[in-house]
Image (tube, coloured by chain):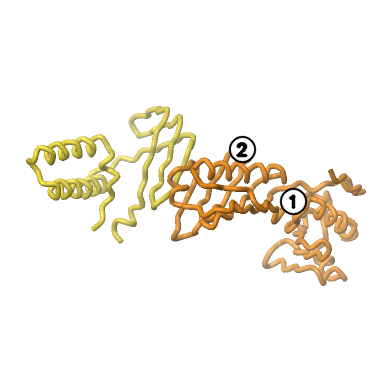
Amino acid sequence: MATFELYRRSTIGMCLTETLDEMVQSGTLSPELAIQVLVQFDKSMTEALESQVKSKVSIKGHLHTYRFCDNVWTFILTDALFKNEDLQENVGRVKIVACDSKLLTQ
Amino acid sequence: MAARRNNPSGIVPTIQNIVSTVDLDCVLDLNHIALHSRNSEFFPKRFSAVIMRIKDPKTTALIFASGKMVCTGAKTEAQSKLAARKFARIIQKLGFPAKFRDFRIQNIVASCDVQFTIRLEKFACTSHGAFSTYEPELFPGLIYRMKQPKLVLLIFVSGNVVIAGAKKRDDFYTAFDNIYPVLAEFKK
């Protein structure tokens, strides 16, 4: 089953990738196993976000750039306002990368 | 510059949209263009062209792998050419040897208001009926296909008239001059 590797670009994903790279370099871990770990990370992230995350946030801002290629949408917003029931936060510049969830189940 | 036609009513149609095409004369890698340019969309399963938009002039271009490009959304002929040149410049900056061949305006859409209501049913029943299609259940406007110049006018009861299919500005000035006295006949 194909996975969305976009979560590997998040802070936690980058730390995992770095750690795994170090272990492969030092020989403690085989490259195939490292790839298996990353694939499992992708699956776990997708599942956790689907089932365990309930909060919704509304993002409003000025669309600076948009791109749609390879079924991936990339948006760059300026002066964005992230609004939740409890709090709101103003962000000067935000990049949103989005993949179509229908492709996972194909 | 062509002089404005002397229309007794003094009404001049305003251009709403211009569609033009140009040949960039080189094969393009659409994936590369979509990945490296701003404000573009490429969904090959749905449509095999990159859809790119620029803010000034506010226009949209359809860029095909063969190197042909369609530019829409401009409000004047000069703006359409400028926008097409801007798009060609973007393609050039991405590394393709784009040229600017055969710029041609394919369609101009204009609209205006004759300031009086029109009796469309009467209009369709007269000798002009040969050129008209009026089916109020299907579409509230009368579709008038003018032979000379060859373009289409959409005439509405409110007096609004939309002229489409012109390749030159003069074409629709002529068309409007032709249709105005006819419309005045059927004023409500």
| Quadrant of the image occupied by residue B137 | bottom right
Q: Chain of mark 2?
A: B
**In screen coordinates, is B23 left or right of A91?**
right
Q: Earlier in the sequence, mark 1 or mark 2?
A: 2
Rendered colour, chain A: yellow
Residue drawn at 70 percent across, 55 percent down: B107
Quadrant of the snapshot with the N terminus of chain B:
top right
Who is closer to the viewer here, A84 or B38? Answer: B38
Q: Chain of mark 1?
A: B
Q: Residue furthest left?
A: A28
Q: Residue furthest front?
A: B97
Label annotation for residue B135: none
At label 1, the amino acid type is Ala
* Residue at image coords 37%, 29%: A88
Instruction: Using the rendered image of the protein, determine whether residue B60 is visible from the camera's viewpoint.
Output: yes
Q: Is residue B188 visible?
A: no
Give me the chain that's orange.
B
Q: Which residue is mark 1?
A: B110
The quadrant the C terminus of chain B occupies is bottom right
Looking at the rendered structure, the secondary structure element under dot 2 is loop
* Residue B56, numbered circle: 2
Q: Amino acid at mark 2?
A: Asp
Q: Residue at x 83, y 57 (%)?
A: B175
Q: Where residue B178 sits in the image (x, y, percent)?
A: 87, 58
State the residue in front, A56 or A100.
A100
SS state under label 1: strand
Q: Write the residue at 14% across / 36% down.
A: A22
* Position above or below: A10 against B97: above
Q: Percent x, y for residue B80? A: 67, 45
Measure how far apart labels 1 and 2 are at the Cα level: 21 Å
